[in-house]
Image (cartoon, rainbow, N blue to C red):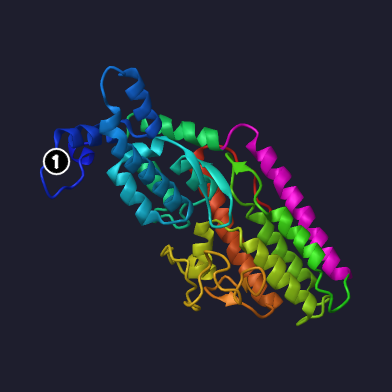
Amino acid sequence: MASSSSFFPRVTSVPSLKELVATHLTNQLGSVSAVKEFISENANIAFEPMLEGQLERLQSQFKKLLEHVVLGNQKEAEDIIKENPNLLLYKRTVVDYSGRIIEGTALQIALGAEDVRFHDDEVAMVEMIMRHLKKLPDGELKIQKQIQQQFPEGWEIKENERAQNDLTALNKVIKTISDAQPNDDCEAALEEFRNHLKPKGVITTGKHFNAQLLVEAYKLYIKNYDSFGGKSAKNKLVWRKVIGYIQRFLPANYAQAFCRGVHSVVLHGERLNRSLKFRFDNDVSFFPLDTNSDKRLGFNFALRGCGEKGKRNATPAMVSLCLKDYANLIEKKTLRLQELCKVQKFRLTI
């Protein structure tokens, strides 16, 4: 049970008994549904008027928590959890920067986004949430239950099917660009690829993003660079409008690594500062998308992985470095998820 101090907000005047009881009950029960169930079971007591304002506050607080988790705002998320750790027990839907509708608890949303540490001595979103969950009654069991719900039996089969469909769509758009005339904009094929990547339905299990797709796109860019004509219109399409468009769907913590510089995170031991401003292009943000019509990720530029946007075609040497660093990042995240979840994940082929 949380300490009594966590039940009461800081006030500048003495609160009324009504305020004290309402605040205590909502924080103790922890969710809107639990409070309403409590009211129903105690129908002979006029709790509804007393709790109305607290229910609104609780619902708003819970919504903000899940938004901070999915948007990668770790400090803000933890501040809310410290005030009311019971919020970690409940789920609802939330929308991320890429437009995905995701349902889950705070932990499940962080797991789906692979918001786990890269360095052994750091704490990312998943580790932070688990630390607070463990303090609740039967915390370890609650963690295991939420993990099992996020990664139920057979989830790997669905992940592999998605990965195969993504790869088929990627190969199709690259083939169209390969067969096109030098100055063909290939817009119909690109639009088909965009529609394939567009979020569909509500995500309730597994990972939010197929991180391997970007690896495969990097490989195809390197493979076809010379045959597509070096500094050519075809390579510009692949770089900006295929690779860049895939990058629009990176979860927030991945985007933060690109803004910091994947190379710096992987090789130089730097930690995420949870910023979505590019390190060397501070006038541009990764997210929200399309805030500047002349600087649209997936249309006007792609990311190089060194903390800046890359408008010009990247050389094969540069992309090889991006590939190596990014592959290292996702491989270690996958291993960390295996360690935390104690469930077998499909192995990455890099």
**In the rendered image, which residue does mark 1 sit on?**
15
- As rendered, which of 288 and 317 lies closer to the eye? 288
Classify mark 1: helix, strand or loop. Answer: loop
Q: Give the extent of the magenta segment.
A: 151-179
Q: Main secondary structure of the magenta part?
A: helix
Residue located at (78% from left, 55% from top) = 169
**Quadrant including the N terminus:** top left
For the C terminus, which image quadrant? bottom right
Residue 162 on the magenta segment = yes
Quadrant assignment, res 178: bottom right
Up/down of 2 relative to 61, above or below: above
User: Residue 153: x percent and y percent?
Assistant: 62, 31
Q: Compared with residue 54, is residue 37 higher up or lower down, i.e. above or below?
A: above
Vertical arrangement, residue 268 with respect to residue 283, above or below: above
Mark 1, other Cα within 10 Å: few <14 / some 14–19 / many ≥20:
few
Residue situated furthest bottom in the rendering: 231
